[in-house]
Image: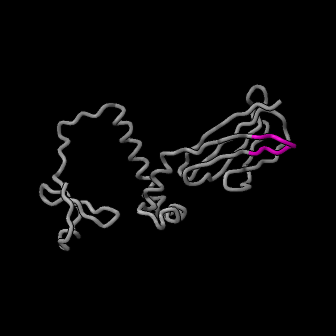
Amino acid sequence: MAKVESNPVVREIRGKIGNLVFRQMPGGETYVSSTPNFGRRKFSQGQKDHQSRFKRAAAYAREAAKTQPIYAELAKGTVKSAYNFALSDWFEAPVIHRIERKDGQIRVEASDNVLVAKVVVMILDDEGKVLEKGNASKVDERLWQYTCVNEGKVLAEAWDLAGNVVKRTELYD
């Protein structure tokens, strides 16, 4: 791969011309390489699955980069674009670090690489039947709180902007 240094005409070219590919990098550099040949390449099932996931992630990122202002805010001042942040958000689910129950309050500590959009708390009986369900309120950057009426097993779900959800259950006696 060759790097174009000082030719102003070639530096503005992007895409494929003949058997050459011109790539414009985020830092402004232009790289020239020959067209890759994937004609005889056989993909494994795992590679095909990943390509399918990446297509869905790219479709989400294209739209979300335009409609979710947080991605543009995160990209400001970096070499990454809003699209890059949206793409990484699609691939990374939130994490529930802990669930606490005290004095009728359930506190859920959750984080995500971009933003935890909502936390849903459910109270379940011994057979798994939902006794109570509701959205928790955001207390600070990582902490969410829900006021409950019923006793039982606590199931918390943390959601991010990309629709990833993680669930965690705690049993309180």
Location of the C terminus (image quadrant): top right
Q: Point out the image quarter for the N terminus.
A: bottom left
Q: Look at 43% across and 58% down and name the residue there.
A: 83
Image quadrant in which you'd find residue 124: top right
Is 111 situated left or right of 69 in this image?
right
Q: Quadrant of residue 29?
A: bottom left
Q: Nearer the viewer, residue 41 or 127?
A: 41
Instruction: Check the image and name the residue furthest to the bottom.
Output: 8
Q: Is residue 102 above or below residue 72?
A: above
| Residue 46 on image: x %, y % | 36, 32
Looking at the picture, how far across and down is residue 8, in whole percent?
20, 74
> Hey, which residue is sitting farthest left in the picture?
18
Chief SS of the magenta region: strand
In the displayed structure, 103 sits above or below 6; it is above
Compared across the picture, whether 69 is left or right of 28 comes to: right
In the rendering, at what x and y percent does residue 105 appear? 82, 45
Residue at the spot x=78%, y=48% of the render? 146
Residue for point 87% across, 43% down: 103
Q: Is 115 included in the stretch rendered in magenta?
A: no
Q: Which residues are magenta?
A: 100-107
Residue at the limit of the structure toward the right, as seen here: 103
User: Which residue is at 59% across, 54% downward?
Assistant: 115
